[in-house]
Image: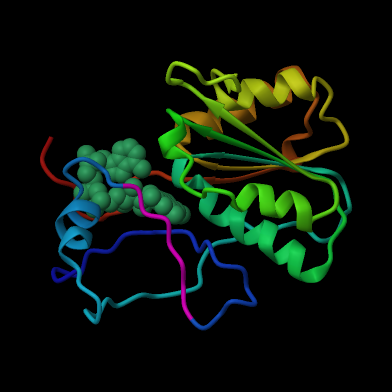
């Protein structure tokens, strides 16, 4: 940003789509970047970006089945991992759980259904915390849905991304109640990332 402050966003494109970068940006109420800058950007405007950073990627040393666990725009790096696996012809079982408030927040349309057709062993479970009337799918906290479906995660790896309240609760509950090994939990917590925060 003009004053030198910056924000962190996770890349949603797979590595083979390297001509550009795809970001999934949540509109934070009052956010200096997501409301103040992003809302005013026009096609052709220039932003300075630095990339890549971070260590949130699939552990290729093992072939354990994988639980992908995201809330909201926490989908971004999970999408990258899934599309990379499709490109490489991976067959490692992967179950994506995506938590959102309501179905409007599930912003990827039919993409998860496409992934189910293209990636052997892939399954998708959306979980809504504030479901609208008529929703017949899963409800509640997304990491609790994982525990309901996988009471024993001893042989799994879990990749959790998004709201830090979720990622902390997931680490605590999945290791304490689901026998997940702590070093089989990988996390990208979406904490506020600016240097200069607005006065509260
Ligand atoms: C490694 C990393 C990767 C990230 N990847 C993504 C991503 O792919 N997509 C994405 O949408 N976000 C992502 N985030 C979170 C994102 O960086 C912040 O939400 C962002 O800094 C908000 O900037 P802003 O200028 O819009 O809001 P700010 O002006 O920085 O914040 C406005 C107010 O909202 C609060 N706030 C800011 N962010 C959050 C938040 N995430 N949760 C709760 N309160 C918040 C601030 O404390 C402040 O009070 C990531 C964060 C990290 C650390």
Check the image and report above or below for 38 versus 199.
Answer: below
Q: Residue at x 63, y 30 (%)?
A: 171
Dividing the picture into quarters, in which one does residue 114 lie? Answer: bottom right
Give the x, y percent position of residue 93. Answer: 84, 46
Check the image and report above or below for 173 versus 167.
Answer: above
Quarter of the picture containing the N terminus is bottom left
Check the image and report above or below for 145 versus 16.
Answer: above
Q: Magenta span: helix, strand or loop, mainly? A: loop
Question: Does residue 122 show up magenta in the picture?
Answer: no
Give the x, y percent position of residue 131. Answer: 46, 20
Farthest front residue in view: 134
Q: Residue at x 75, y 70 (%)?
A: 87
Q: Which residues are magenta?
A: 20-26
Q: How is the image coloured?
A: rainbow
* Count of numbered marks: 0
Dividing the picture into quarters, in which one does residue 143 lie? Answer: top right
Give the x, y percent position of residue 165. Answer: 46, 29
Q: Nearer the viewer, residue 48 or 136?
A: 136
Q: Residue at x 22, y 64 (%)?
A: 5
């Amino acid at each position: 940003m003009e004053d030198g402050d910056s924000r962190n966003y996770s890349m949603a494109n797979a590595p083979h789509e390297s001509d550009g970068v795809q970001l999934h940006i949540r509109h934070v109420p009052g956010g200096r970047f997501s409301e103040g800058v992003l809302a005013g950007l026009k096609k052709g405007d220039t932003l300075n970006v630095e990339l890549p950073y971070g260590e949130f990627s699939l552990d290729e040393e093992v072939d354990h089945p994988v639980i992908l666990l995201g809330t909201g725009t926490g989908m971004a790096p999970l999408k990258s991992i899934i599309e990379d696996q499709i490109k490489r012809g991976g067959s490692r079982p992967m179950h994506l759980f995506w938590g959102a408030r309501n179905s409007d927040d599930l912003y990827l349309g039919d993409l998860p259904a496409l992934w189910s057709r293209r990636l052997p062993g892939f399954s998708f479970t959306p979980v809504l915390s504030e479901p609208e009337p008529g929703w017949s799918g899963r409800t509640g906290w997304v990491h609790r849905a994982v525990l309901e479906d996988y009471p024993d995660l001893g042989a799994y790896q879990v990749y959790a991304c998004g709201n830090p309240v979720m990622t902390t609760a997931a680490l605590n509950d999945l290791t304490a109640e689901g026998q997940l090994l702590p070093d089989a939990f990988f996390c990208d917590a979406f904490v506020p990332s600016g240097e200069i925060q607005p006065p509260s």
